Image (cartoon, rainbow, N blue to C red):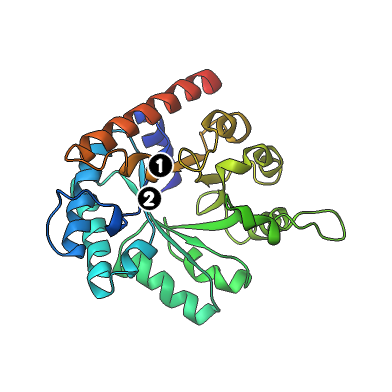
Amino acid sequence: MKRTELVEKIFEKGSFLCVGLDPDVKKLPECIEGTPAERVLTFNKAIIDATAPYCVAYKPNLAFYECLGADGIRVLEETVKYIRAKYPDQFIIADAKRGDIGNTAAMYARTFFEAMDFDAVTLAPYMGEDSVRPFLNYKDKWSIILALTSNSSAKDFETVHDAKGVPMYERVIRLSRHWGSPIDTMYVVGATQAQSLESIRAVAPRHFLLVPGVGAQGGSLEEVVRYGMIDECGLLVNSSRGIIYASSAEDYAAAAGAAAAELAAEMSRLMKARLG
């Protein structure tokens, strides 16, 4: 998906919501029957149907599918196909956090962009440019590079300062912004680190930011908008547990839709207040 198309959908819907499709078999409603893989696929389809009017992106985290073995990978593929067939305007992110040497990275890129038809994949940049470059060779596909994450251990590496006083996450952005451009590269910045968005915007003023951590992890949507929004929005804010597990009863899909609608309405309000 082109950047212009993504921006158009955000303003058309008045939403920059990304729904994380992270189905834990142990947390699925008991009313869903079948094998673990069948239950996950049924759950995903219902969640997608309920939330599609309110979001612009979906982000399956591969761990929740890989743990089911080959059946889980098939469910992931079927989930992507379902979105493509019914909601072709949705942006689909593989939350895979891959990062390896060039020839291996090329195979990962082929997996996600050719075999599975994702729009984007999350990447760990620790091994440098040649671990990201193969993904950037695909036109209208996106590399989403980990910068400053929401987890408490982010301080172990990401916020450590070098001899010049530059934190690691900022060094990552400064270097990698030249590998691609704002039309094919995004950065992950956790919502719990919202105040750092101001300094990040000084380094990457035009790049889209994928922002997890709103909702169950306690991140503030209002702060994310205040420090991170630009004239083209430039944000995809992800919510997973707060939406997909809004209910564990038979109304799970309706509850997910209501949770997504509520968050999207707040996004619309904040966008109008910020951008007019």
Residue 167 left/right relative to 17 = right
- Circles 2 and 1, Cβ within 8 Å, touching? The answer is yes
Q: Secondary structure at mark 1?
A: helix
Q: Which residue in the structure is indicated by mark 2?
A: 1
Seen from the viewer's position, the closer of residues 159 and 118 is: 159
Q: Secondary structure at mark 2?
A: loop
Q: Position of residue 125 (x, y in %)?
A: 60, 65
Q: Which residue lies at the image location 59% right of the left edge and 52% below the top edge?
A: 149
Q: Amino acid at mark 1?
A: Leu
* Structural crowding at the residue carrying mark 2, measured as other residues with C-alpha within 10 Å and reported as few (<14), some (14–19) or many (≥20): some
Residue 53 falls in image quadrant: top left
Q: Which residue in the structure is indicated by mark 1?
A: 6
Q: Amino acid at mark 2?
A: Met
Indicate which disc residue 184 carries. Answer: none
Seen from the viewer's position, the closer of residues 187 and 237 is: 237
Q: Which residue lies at the image location 53% right of the left edge and 22% below the top edge?
A: 275
* Structural crowding at the residue carrying mark 1, measured as other residues with C-alpha within 10 Å and reported as few (<14), some (14–19) or many (≥20): many
Residue 179 left/right relative to 98 = right
Residue 177 visible in rendering: no
Q: Position of residue 85 (x, y in %)?
A: 18, 51
Of labels 2 and 1, earlier in sequence is: 2
Residue 179 left/right relative to 31 = right
